[in-house]
Structures are given as structure tokens and as C-alpha cells.
Image (cartoon, rainbow, N blue to C red):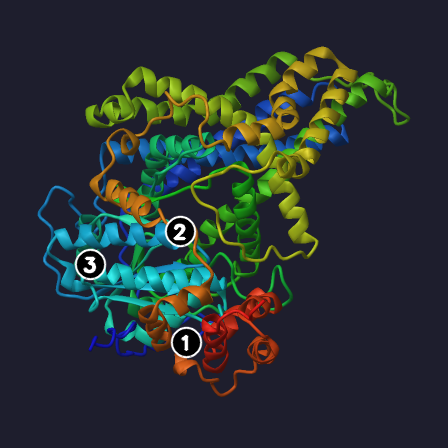
Amino acid sequence: MRPPPAPALPPEAPLAMPVQSLRRAPPAEQLPRRASLFVRRLFVIGGAAVLTVFAAREMYRVLEVGGLTLLESLVLGLFVVLFAWIGFSFTNALSGALTMLARPDDGLGIDASAPLPALSTRTAILMPTYNEDPSRIFAGLQATYESLEATGALDAFDFFILSDTTDADVWIAEEAAFLALRARTGGEARLFYRRRPRNIDRKAGNIAEWVTRFGGAYDHMLVLDADSVMTGACIVRLAGAMEASPRSGLIQTLPVIVGGRTLFARMQQFAGRLYGPLIAYGLAGWHGPDSNYWGHNAIIRTRAFAGCAGLPHLTGRKPFGGHILSHDFVEAALIRRGGWGVNMVPWLEGSYEEGPPSLTDLAVRDRRWCQGNLQHAAVLPTRGLNPLSRLHMLVGIGSYATAPLWLIMLLAGLLTALQARFVPPDYFPAEFSLFPNWPAQDPVRAAWVFVGTMGVLLVPKLIAYALMLFQGPLRRGFGGGVRAFLSLLAETLIAGLIAPVTMLAQSAAVASILAGRDGGWQPQRRDDGSVSARQTFVHFLPHTLFGLLLAGAAIAISLPLFFWMSPVVLGLVLAVPLVLWTGAARPLLAGVLKTPEEIAPPAVLARAKALARETGAAGPPGEATSRLAADPALLAAHRAMLPDDGQRAPGDYAPERLVARAKLHDAPDLVAALGLLTPREKAAALGDHEALERLIALAVRPPPAG
């Protein structure tokens, strides 16, 4: 007789996670301050302010020839705001270069060259998932598990797959993959799976539900994303750092983007790998213990998270009210408010993730992130927040608010040129003036302002390239200095063409959110970015038409203006072919944009790729009911994993369950039953004891004769 399967979940260890007040600050122990941190912050923020003042003065001199018109004043104001934004990025990059050359003491004691620390605490590794391809996420999780096992520290860790999946077929495929993962690894005692019937508050609610049920048994939790892979050494060092620094509440790694197959994904992969460390080192250098959280590939002290990061619902209607979408920034801010340190460690290698495969996928994800970041405007007044926590939220808001500002400045500049071209100047206005009013700008100084602005944008890329050249293994990882430089040129040119398309997409997203439209929650696509030409044409036709409109206006004014605006115009007009080309699975430019992880894949990534190829060979998940009926072991495990054995819990009045029961009662066979059920009703039926038994009975019933 076959023994019963091991329980899918360990015994519960509840941990209270009270909802935090945004109006009252709790008492908190203050972290010690280092004078060097003040100097770095003064360099980054003060340096950006000095650059902005100088640029504003030069731009004023460009426009003030003959006095400032209303449009010119608007252009000047927008220029100052936007230059401050890029100036801040520039000084952060300079700080990153200094930090890379002389890494400061972060107080965490992480030394990648030292032996792995011995652990005395327990850590839960959490992988939330929502309608993802099970073969991919379980392959990455197994590769991480095996890498951790190779360190000899596996006993200090448990793994939880936390499913919010709503697709019934994917749900059953997850359960089958979970059982197969346990069988392959022998990890029945430390591999666990839980699916929530209702995904309340999305990912934040998924993690919070785990904390309140199981968090009491674990000192730390390491949160992954569905595409995350981490080395065992990286995980052990993170857990060791938490043990060594008892006031640390969260330690964020720098995930390296890997696995890109499309040109768009590989371009992001290259940019993240070359420029990303420079930016992250800069942030880590002046953030210190007041850093931020990106939602995954980070270790968190469970007690700090439970005690400080219970998220309230915001007042008002969606998209600004309701549960907090971009929860990670707010959780980091509340943990820091509670007196815990939040650190970033970009120098700790072994943390990986994937990027969106196409510009279309980026736009979908960006729409959700845009709504979440704009929502932070309601969190900014929270009492007791650290000033840098407020700055993180302002930067998040600015990352999307700047897109419409760029667009407005572009249109204002164009209107200024139109005014100069077609509106007769009023040389002698009605009010008394000794001199005529000559509307004009200084073209020579304007050219120098443009060159300076481009320098502030591009010099950080060259700094990152120069730092790479002096690191032999890293230089070889990029394919050598020449290939890396060609890759830098290719990435810069393609990114320049994509930038105006992204600007328009983000501006439309901001307008949509301000109009009160909620973006919903859609599963992310991975790997293949191919989208049909028809879909791409419909989605990006407005971008093309807007580009043609800009081109027509520029040509009507003057040919030099058209050439000046050609980078913006070209990107918009070519939006459709650009998206199709960069989203292709086998693009051109395959010889460049190489990264170290692509040329010499780390063992954990090679293992994850091999496992994904092996487990995904069977193709997409089959129909859930037929799969359960054909596999008694899977069916038995599915029944055992249902909350309350599939019985209705008190207070559960979900209509999908009752409607599914009624429809299944009337269905003569499985085909008819599946045709009657909506996707939500099918998932409810598979989670209900009575409806499940009816489905299985229909699945094993022989088809009617004739």
C-alpha cells in the first residue's frame, strides 16, 4: 500500500501582523549615524543642485534674448525640473564610481571572498506566483534549491511556493510540478505549496498571509519573484549578514537580468549588466541603512516585517485608493520607520531575474507600476518616515511624472518655434518701452546647452564602460573592450529610438490613471516577446500618427528644426516596425549585447535552463479535470491540499462556488460541463469538494453511445 503523501504545508506558526497607521508614528530605536554618509549625500544631492542652477542660468540666457515670452517661461521651468532629474542621476553615477573604487563599510560584514558563515537561524524562501508557466518557475526554484544544498546549509532553509493563480489548468499544473519537484529533490520536509482561493491584496496580501500563518517559525524570509534564481552562496551570505547585524530589517541584492532572447530583452540585459552596478553602487553608497526595497531577491527579518509593514488600505476609489500596489517601497519605508536598517548590497553576486521580452510587455508592466508609484502620493505624508524614504517615493513618482513633462516641454518648444515663424512679432507693445521687443533666442548657447545635457545623460555610460575595462574578468565577460563598446553604441542608439515611444506610452498611462482608470492585474509574459503585427499596429498606431504630426509641424517651420527633432520623430514614426523588430526571438545584432552571464553562464543558471527545457518539453498545461481524473496520485494530493477539505468555510459566500455546483448538476458530460463554466467558476469548482467529485465523475463517465 502506497504511503500517504507528505503534507503540503508545515504546522502553522502564527505571527501577528497588525495594520500600520499612516497618521501616527510608532516609537522606534534610532540607528547610529556616520559622518561619511552625510558627506556622500551632500555630494549627490548638493552636486545635482549646483548642476541644475548652472544649467538653468545657461538656459535662461538662451531664451531671454529680447525678454521671455509665456511659452519661453514654460520651457525654462520644465527644463529646470527635468535637468534636476537627470542631474541627480548623473551625480549618483559619480558617487557609484567612487563607491566601486573604495567600497565603504556597510556594517553588514559581507565578504564574498571569506568562507560561508555557519547559520544558527531559520529562513523561509518564498516564491509567489500568479498564473505563471510552472515548468519555468519550478526549474528556477529547483536550481536554487540544489545550489543551496551544495553549500551544506540546506537545513537552515524551507521553501514555500505561494500561489495566487486563478487559471484552473495552471493551478493543477503547479500542484503536479510541486509533487515532481519533491520527488526529484527528496525535499518533502522543506518544500511546501499553498494556493489562496482568493488573492486578496495581490502579492502584498500573499506574503502577509504567509507571515500570519507561518512566520512565527522563521527568523527571516527571502522573497523571490517568479523568474528569480539565486545561488546558494548568495543566500547563505544574506542569512549570515542578518545574523551578524541584529538591527538590519531588510537587505536588498542587485538582481542581474538574464535569459533574454529577444533584441529588446538583450538590450535591457546588457544595459542592466554594464550600467546597473554603477547606479546601484551609487545608491548603496549614500543611502546607507535608509535604502529601498524592489520587491524580490531580498532577505527580510520576519519580526521586523510583521511588526512594521502591515499595509493599510488607502481611502478613496481606485486607482488611487484601495490596497497599495507598489507595496515594496512602502514596506521598506515602514520597516525603516520602525527603527530597522534597510540596506542594499550590489557587490554580492549570485542574484538573477528576467526582464520583459518586448516593448509591448514593458508598456503593460509599466502601466501597473505607474499606477502604484503615483499612488505613493497618498503615502508621502505618513508620520515618522525617514526623509530618504520619502525621497524614494518621490523618485518613483518622478520616474513616471517626468514623461508627460518631457512631452509638454517638447510641445511647448515646438509652439515657441511656430510662434516665431508664423505669428508677427509685436516689436512695440502698448506699454511704454525705450527699445523694441525682439523675440529671439541665442542659437549658439542653445547648442552648448544641448551638448551639456547630452553629456549629463551619456557620461555615466562611458564611466561604467571605463570601469569595466579595468576589470579583466568582467571585460572578457562582455566579449572584450571593442565588442563591449560596439554593444554600448548599439544599446544607446536603440534606446534613443525607443525613448520617445516610451515617453508617449508613460504619458498616456499617467493620463489614464488621473482619469480614474484602474490597470488591473495581468500575469507577465516571459521569454518570447513576439506579438502579432496586427496587435502591434493597433497598439502603436497613435504613436506613429503623433510622430507624423510632429514631423509635419517641424518641416512647416524649417528644415533645420526637422533635423533637430529627427531622433524623436524617427522613433515615433517607426514605432510599429521597431516593436516588431526588437521583440523578435531571433533578432539581428546577435553578435553584440553580450553579457558575462551569457558568455559563461553560472552553474545555477545553466541548471535552471536545462531543467526548464526538460520539464517544459511536454508543452503547455493540459485540461485540469482530465489531468486529475487520469492521475490518482495527483488527485489524492489535490484533495489533501484543499483548505478545509474543500468544504465551505464559515463566511464564504462566493457566488462562483454555488453557480458552479448548479451548472455541474445539470451537465450531462465533461465537455458540456466545461462549456458551461466560466474560468472563475471552474477554479471554484476544483476547490469545492462537492463540485470536484461531480467533475471527476463526469470525466470518468464513458461517452454516450452514438
Could you tell me residue 632's position as x and y percent?
34, 71
> Which element type, helix, strand or loop, lies under badge 2?
loop
Please give the label number shown on residue 18.
1
Q: Is residue 74 above or below residue 508?
A: above
Q: Amino acid at mark 2?
A: Trp
User: Is 234 displayed left or right of 306 in the figure?
Assistant: left
Could you tell me residue 586's position as x and y percent?
44, 28
Please give the label number shown on residue 185.
3
Camera-near label (3 vs 1) is: 3
Q: Is residue 53 above or below residue 197?
A: above
Please give the label number shown on residue 569.
none
Could you tell me residue 295's position as x and y percent?
39, 54
Q: CA distance from mark 2 to mark 1?
A: 22 Å
* Of pointers 2 and 1, the one earlier in the residue sequence: 1
Q: Is residue 542 above or below residue 127?
A: above
Please give the label number shown on residue 294.
2
User: Is 450 displayed left or right of 116 in the figure?
Assistant: right
